Amino acid sequence: MLNFDGQWRFQSPGVITSDVQEDILVKVIGRVASNASRQDVLETFKRRFAQAAGKTSSKSSSESWAESDLRQYMRDAAENAPMFVEALYDGLIDMGQFRAVIPPWTYVNTILASSGYRIDPPNLIMSNAPVPIAVPTAIPSLDTQANACIQRSLSESESFLSAGRYRAAVQEILWLLETISTAFQGAEYPDGNITGKYFNKIIGDLRRFNRDRTLSRVVDWMENMHGYLSSPGGGGIRHGALLNANIEITESEARLYCDLTRSYISFLLHEHSRLGATTL
């Protein structure tokens, strides 16, 4: 099995085109079969692709029927790209255990390239997935537990995005932004200390102590986004949404909010590190 988002098993993020299916059959499975019993190879992959399609298979009466049945199971499995690729991977692992010569993953990934997926054992990678805004993985001014909490929440938000749970993705990243702001409680600036205990008060202090600096302008942008997403008549994320309004959030909107918030989080973490503020 390959590691990938479990939700993809139930909600397919894409399909495998007929061209890729044919290339897999001819250039991968066919070439593996050239150094082993052809029908045994076809039967092995037939069983794996049948499983991916939610079906069962039995041994075909001939080599030609085995190939015909395999084509059909591949077409069925292709409706769910991750499970199709997993079937290919599992079939190749089976053949390796049978001491058949199998191709390197770099070769297989060349065949899969146009599908948008690649195999990086034991993981399946969606190679055309949007790359999230980078956030520092370890902030020296925060302790191990705090750093772990940040990375865990970022990962959770990305998992929600991949699974199509767009509101949950934005809620998670917004929660993290608010949580990170509390790391500034008591932070010292030349004009005073941060005394606020909640997000709005804390970033208000940050603005006041950083007039005419980039941080002050960033706080303005952050506050506008946070306010919009908090409003029932706006983004409707934090305090509910008006029932008579369009409360759905699209994938592109969710990605925008998550990327913006990740940018603000990254900036705040760098500021916290610069200050050498008290750790959580």
Image (tube, grey):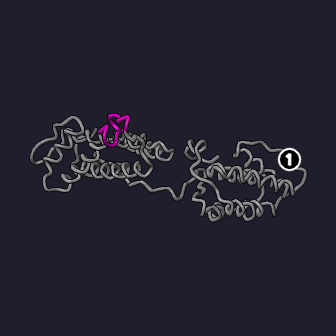
115 lies above or below 255: below
On the image, the x and y values in percent for residue 123 come to 58, 51
Front-lying residue, 240 or 259: 240
> Magenta span has 231?
yes
117 lies above or below 203: below
Assign the magenta stretch its main secondary structure.
Answer: loop
The amino acid type of the residue labelled 1 equals Lys
On the image, the x and y values in percent for residue 70 come to 78, 53
The magenta region covers 230-244
Question: Residue 237 occupies which quadrant of the picture?
Answer: top left
219 lies above or below 202: below
Q: Is residue 13 left or right of residue 203?
A: right
Quadrant in which the C terminus is drawn: top left
Residue at 54% x, 55% y: name it. Answer: 126
Instruction: Please give the residue where the numbered disc 1 appears in the rendered image.
Output: 59
Residue at 29% x, 44% y: name it. Answer: 228
19 lies above or below 186: below
On the image, the x and y values in percent for residue 174 come to 34, 42
Front-lying residue, 248 or 221: 248
Say few, some or many: other residues with alpha carbon within 10 Å of mark 1 (under 14 / 14 to 19 / 20 or more).
some
Q: Is residue 61 left or right of residue 270?
A: right
Q: Residue furthest right?
A: 61
* Secondary structure category for the residue under label 1: loop
